[in-house]
Image: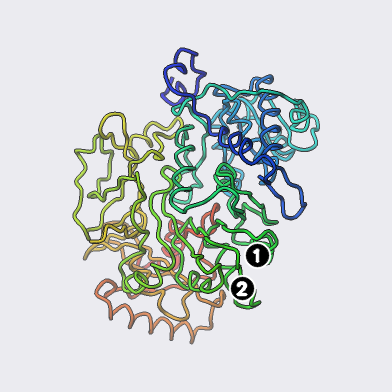
Amino acid sequence: MSVSEAQLKPQPASVHAEAPRCNVSDFIFEQAKQRPDQAAVIEHASGRELTYAQLAQNIDNIAFGLRQLGICDGARTAFAIKPGMEFVESVFALFRAGAVPVVVDPGMGVDNMLKCIEEAEPTALVGIPAAHMLSKLKKRSFRTVKQRVTVGRRWLWGGASLEELRARKVTGGEASPTTAETTAAILFTSGATGVPKGVVFRHGVFVGQTEMIRDAYGIQPGEIDVPCFALFALFSVAMGVTIVLPDIDFSNPGKASPAKVVDAINAHHATMSFGSPAVWKRVGPYLEQTGVTLPSVKRILIAGAPVPYATLAMFKDKLAPDGDLHTPYGATESLPFSTISAEEILTDTRLDTANGAGTCVGKPLDGVQAKVIRFVDGPIEIIDDAEELPVGEVGEIIVNSAVTTQEYFNRPENTKLAKIRGAGVSLWHRMGDTGYFDDQGRLWFCGRVNHRVETATGRLYPIPVEGVFNNHDAVSRCALVGLGDRPNQVPCIVLELQEGHMPAKDLRDRIRSELQRMAEAHELTKGITHFLFHEGLPVDVRHNAKINRDALKHWADTQLPEVAR
């Protein structure tokens, strides 16, 4: 039995008695006591809403029904529900029952999704009819599923419906006797930076994340959030913040209607919103074109990829007088890590980014320990074996905090590679990112470790190099890739232009000449002579913002085979 499997087994009562009870669903019940009549969840399109009292009651009812079905106490449960009231009710009910929701991003494609589910070996499926139908068509991936709950109309697959569970009113329900160390969920990474892996979250991590996000941004109960990323909505509702779910496809933020996002914000006088750069890159121009503002918004959080400063600048004077944008940095395995405001970026770090310094992601938050260490290709067993680098030197970023996860599910080799044993039982997580600290204690992000370009004359990091070429007026964004194999790669810049279409050859030649002159003017980029034009850089499935550099490198190698050899 692997370590992961052992941890997911129901724990005997004697084990639970040794540690204080901790269950992330308790946040909802505490809010229900303090503000029972405040709206907890509102669906903007349908107008449906739940107060905290109603939400808590529904969670208790559903959790009781889940226990009766055996979906409790460590039962891994494939979770496939679209964002809405049922999404919020169900996930907190699973937490309360002690079950372990297994969440896979549908945007990663059916094949990858099925592989993740098969790897997790869930014993239950809670999902919409389409998910149950898929489980019948792809029986191998769902072969371990014994119990089913359908959200919506149940067809021929049996089991219970969420409506039936919700209808059984329970009084005095209690959460499963979980502790801070009990597994709460398995969230699969998107696969944007490698093979999708199941990150094991414990109840203590979810509680710590909720408190850290709340404290970092001064979020108060009674505020109103329009989240454009479904999982972040769970943090907000746990904080006592009303969530208004906009009428968008949460699985495809790059296609979100800016009008619908803005309408949800202004109709409910929202004070905050969270979304990927792909969302706000659409909302910003919409505000400029229509003259509409967001006068109630105090904070917008943008995460998932570096944010172009042109996007940040679009929101100047569009928010509440004390409003600002913030770009938190982190990873599925450790979030949040650090944060920086748009004000600081636009007035302080922007010019450095344009001159090849990388992207500043701010200072680590309170309670977060961070180091930059020398690159090591294999595992690092203990922290004493990691060589910490001085200020200004680029290396691999590692982190240790109360919200740093401990392992990947059933992937001991990946866990060994990503974790470093610290003092006592603590573990450091290797972010897989490159960066450095400046003399103010701020962290500068330089790109992924496995995206660095190794040439015969030295090493190049994507984000600093791209910052130079993004200054060109015609460039929307660009990506550095290495043609050929390390350590003799040839650097190449792949460009997506502002207009979003392939320009005529004479214009491409002119832009290429201008970029070559820019390259020669910077010590960092001297010697870069290869420039390719792309109609639309491929991006990750979760945030639609991270550039898929592996796919882009393969494409570039085929475009310039004589160089890639």
- Density class for disc 2 (Cα within 10 Å; few <14, some 14-19, many ≥20) is some
Image coords of residue 54 (percent x, y): 71, 37
Dot 1 lies on which element? helix
**Residue visible at 33% across and 65% down in the picture:** 358
According to the image, label 2 marks what residue? 287
The residue at the point 62 percent across, 55 percent down is 226
Q: Residue furthest front?
A: 34
Which of 90/191 is in front? 90
Name the image quarter holding the C terminus.
bottom left
Measured in 3D between alpha carbons, the distance from the residue under mark 1 to the one under mark 2, in whole angstroms, is 9 Å
Location of residue 240 by image quarter? top right
Q: Position of residue 417 (x, y in %)?
A: 33, 38
Q: Crowdedness of circle 1 by 10 Å Cα count: few (<14), some, many (20+)? A: some
Secondary structure, mark 2, is helix
Tag 2: residue type? Leu
Which residue type carries mark 1? Val
What residue would you read off at disc 1?
262
Residue at the spot 55% in from the left edge and 53% down from the top edge: 541
In depth, the one of 478 and 394 nearer the eye is 394
Dot label at residue 304: none
Name the foreground residue: 132 vs 92: 92
Q: Are marks 1 and 2 in contact (CB under 8 Å)?
A: yes
The first of marks 1 and 2 along the sequence is 1
